[in-house]
Amino acid sequence: MKITSITSYQVEIPLKPARRMISALGQHTVSRYVLVRIQTDAGIEGAGEATVMPGGVARPRGERRRSSITFLHRC
């Protein structure tokens, strides 16, 4: 079985004012995600998700949307 397709989507979901978060990095008005769809030559499909945190959490680990998507497409 081999992976034949990896499709990634960048998603931003606006947060309602009552659900907005405030941290040391400031106020967060959106939640950011990378969604992934993987297909194989055997007809099996799978999906995955990664939450992308801005600022201090993302920088040391490289967990930004663009770098996450680049990594997935290199697999």
Image (cartoon, grey):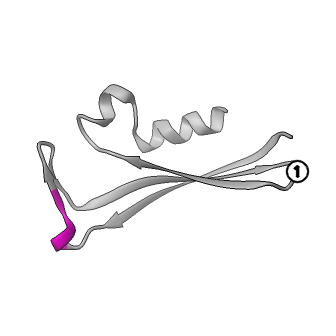
**Residue at (24, 39) in percent of width and height:** 55
Q: Tell me if 48 is positioned left or right of 25 in this view.
A: right
The number of numbered badges drawn on the structure is 1
The amino acid type of the residue labelled 1 equals Ala
Where residue 53 sits: x, y (%)? 32, 45
**Residue at (40, 36) in percent of width and height:** 63
**Residue at (64, 38) in percent of width and height:** 73
Quarter holding the N terminus is top right
Dot 1: what SS? loop
Residues 52 and 44: in front is 44
Where residue 4 sits: x, y (%)? 80, 45
Where residue 65 sits: x, y (%)? 44, 44
Task: Mark 1: give few (<14), some (14-19) or many (20+) Cα within 10 Å.
Answer: few
State the predominant SS element of the stretch in magenta.
helix
Where residue 32 sits: x, y (%)? 37, 55
**Residue furthest out toward the top:** 60
Q: Tell me if 44 is positioned left or right of 9 in this view.
A: right
Q: Is residue 26 above or below residue 12?
A: above
Residues 30 and 1: in front is 1
**Residue at (28, 43) in percent of width and height:** 54
Q: Tell me if 54 is positioned left or right of 52 in this view.
A: left
Query: What residue is shown with label 1?
Result: 42
Magenta-colored stretch includes residue 26: no
Magenta-colored stretch includes residue 20: yes
Quarter holding the C terminus is top right
Q: Tell me if 49 is positioned left or right of 52 in this view.
A: right
Quadrant of res 62: top left
Q: Which residues are magenta?
A: 17-21
